[in-house]
Every structure is written in C-alpha cells, then in structure tokens.
Image (cartoon, grey):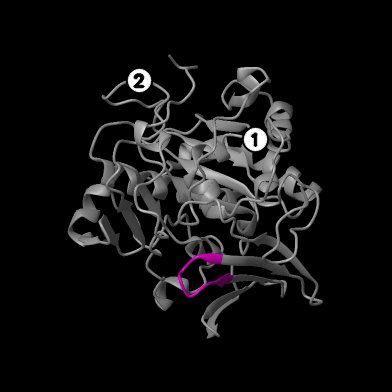
Amino acid sequence: MRNAPPTVAPAFRAAPTIAAPLPPPPRPQQRDLTPLAIGAGVVAGAVVGATIADMHSQRREVVEGGRTVYTEPDRIIIRDPGGQAYVRGNDLYRFRYGARDIRTDTVGGETRTVVVRPDGSEIITVVGADGSLRRRIRRDPRGGELVIIDNTYRDPRAVGGFYVDAPPPVVNIPYDRYIVDAQEASPDVIYQTMVAPPVQRIDRRYSLDEIRYSPNVRMQMPSIDVNTIIFETGSWTIPPDQAARLQVIADGLNQAIQRNPREVFLIEGHTDAVGNEVDNLSLSDRRAQSAAELLTQQFGVPAENLTSQGYGEQYLKEQTQGPSAINRRVTIRNITPLLNGGQASLPPPPAGTAPPR
C-alpha cells in the first residue's frame, strides 16, 4: 500500500465545467511584506502558529459565476460545480526572510514587487491586473537580469487558461525512479531525479497555472515524495526535530540550481482524507509553503526557484478515508521543462510566443 501510485480524484479526470479564469488570491497586506530578519524563525504564511480549525472564523463563502469561493486572509479556494476544487495562495510571503527592503508599485495595471537582498541583488515579481504571476526575475547587483519564470504565454487550447485536458503520460521508467521515496533513496538518486528529463516529449510551453492545476501535465515530470517529515493532523508546522531531515533534499535542490539558475521546483502539499475538502486544500497549501520556507530559511535554497501548491486529499497514496501519515506528505518535482517547452537548459522564449514545434 505504501508504494501504490497516488490516485487522481475522479473530478480531475474531466475538464472543469466553468471555463472562466480562476479568481486571484487576496493580495498581501503591506504589513505582511515587511522584511523578516535572518534567525527570526520559520513562518508559515501570514498566520503563524495556527491550526486549520483557526481558519474557520476567518473564512468567507460566496457564490460567483456558478462557483463557490472561500476566501481566507491569505488564500482563496474555488469549488467548480463539476467537483473540482482549487486553492490559490501567494508566493510573495516567502520572500520576506532575510530581505533588506521590499517595495511594491503598480504601473500600467501590473504590480511589481521588488525584494532587495543584503548583497544588493533583487527579486522582481510581476503580477498582472488579474492577480496572476506574469514574470519572476533575478537582478544581480550589476544590473544583469535572469528571467526565472515567464508566465505570459497562453495556449488557446487551455480551458480558462488553467486546465489542460491531456491524456496521462506514458511512463517507461521504473516506478521507483518516477515517484522516488526520499526515505529510501540515496542523495545521488534524489539529485538525478531533480534534473531528470520529462518521461515523454513536451510539445509546448505550459503556464504555471496549467502545471499547477492539470495533473496529467504535471505528471510528465518525475517526483520525490518527502516522506521523511510527518505533519500532525490539522497542522502545517514542521517540528524542529524533523527539519534536519530536509538536508538531503535541500542539497539536491541547491546542486541543481547551481547547475542551472533557471530551474523551478514545485513543492506540492497533500493531506489525508480526514476533514472536509476546503480545510484540506487550505491545509495542504500551507504545508507546501511551510516546506518551501524552511528550505530557504534553514538550508539556503533560493526562494525564487521554488513555488508551492496544495492539493488537499485529491492524490491519496494510501487508499483510506481515515488518518494516514503516508498521505500527509510533501512532494517535489522539477517543472522547468514544462515551463520552457522541453528546453530545460535554455532561457524562456520571448514573452507571448510559442516554442518551435
């Protein structure tokens, strides 16, 4: 049972019934984007030291365009009438740690948040008027720029710009190299998985939202189940005695990013089936963010090379509706080839263009 491939919730085997773009997450308050001193401790999102039960009083529910939308101070959860549900958070909270200054300005409908680091380098996050990430750029102290994420391309085949109705990938590699068990794998296998190619040819670029919300797109890349850390039920806190277990994962990430500074890794959060769907989506997203923050704060993994997303109970590894530590897990996969149309080692194509076929 431990090695069973994660199942996909039935709702996600069909396209969403509403094709409008997903609404954006709440924008962070300026007070939540103030620099956080090195050594200030791990902070998981805007609400610290809470459990998912503490979110209930802060959650608002409305129906918009046929969808049910639940808003929390730092997240939004969208339930489609077809049964799919999505959580959207904001990556910017993770960039506070060790920052010298953070400034935000809006020009022509785009909001640019510039995080200035102690060495004078800057991380620039550009968000569109619709709240979606457009670009993430690292600018060195001399002014040289490296585009890490260019999220401006939209393929007309995508439903609502966030879902791709693709067939499951054909996997011809051994299962234990496709979904790697971090507890069993050697550091070399973990690193090789982080830089492994897609399991099949990538025929176009995908947006970050298409990767986040289309399981068959995401599953074209091998992944690592970080089952060395166990979350308590209802909590997204990583206990200090477990944090050190992320060392091998962090070493692999840092080595891969040193090899290619444009690498982007998706940290995925999962829950067991205990509790309701909305709670579990919020909880899993916070777990993914918590792991991403810890990798940056304790092990120096560049925040700009990580992004996080929660999936709740949609991908159970152990088929049980009861408590399951195996299902309360974090997964990591390299999504660079998906963002760049299979050209993992090349810079992103010019904004708004499709890759050569």
On screen, residue 102 versus residue 254, left or right, reads left
Residue 261, quarter of picture: bottom right
Numbered circle sitting on residue 319: 2
On screen, residue 52 versus residue 105, left or right, reads left
Of badges 1 and 2, nearer the viewer stands 2
Image point 68% across, 48% down: which residue? Answer: 204
**Amino acid type, residue under disc 1 in the picture:** Val
Q: Dot 2: few (<14), some (14–19), or many (≥20) neighbours within 10 Å?
A: some
Residue 124, quarter of picture: bottom right
Q: Which image quarter holds the N terminus? A: top left
Q: What stretch is highlighted in magenta?
A: 126-133
Asked if one can make out residue 292 in the rendered structure from this viewpoint, the answer is: no
Numbered circle sitting on residue 248: 1
Report x, y in % for residue 46.
38, 63
Q: Dot 1: few (<14), some (14–19), or many (≥20) neighbours within 10 Å?
A: some
Image point 27% across, 58% down: which residue? Answer: 69
**Amino acid type, residue under disc 2 in the picture:** Gln
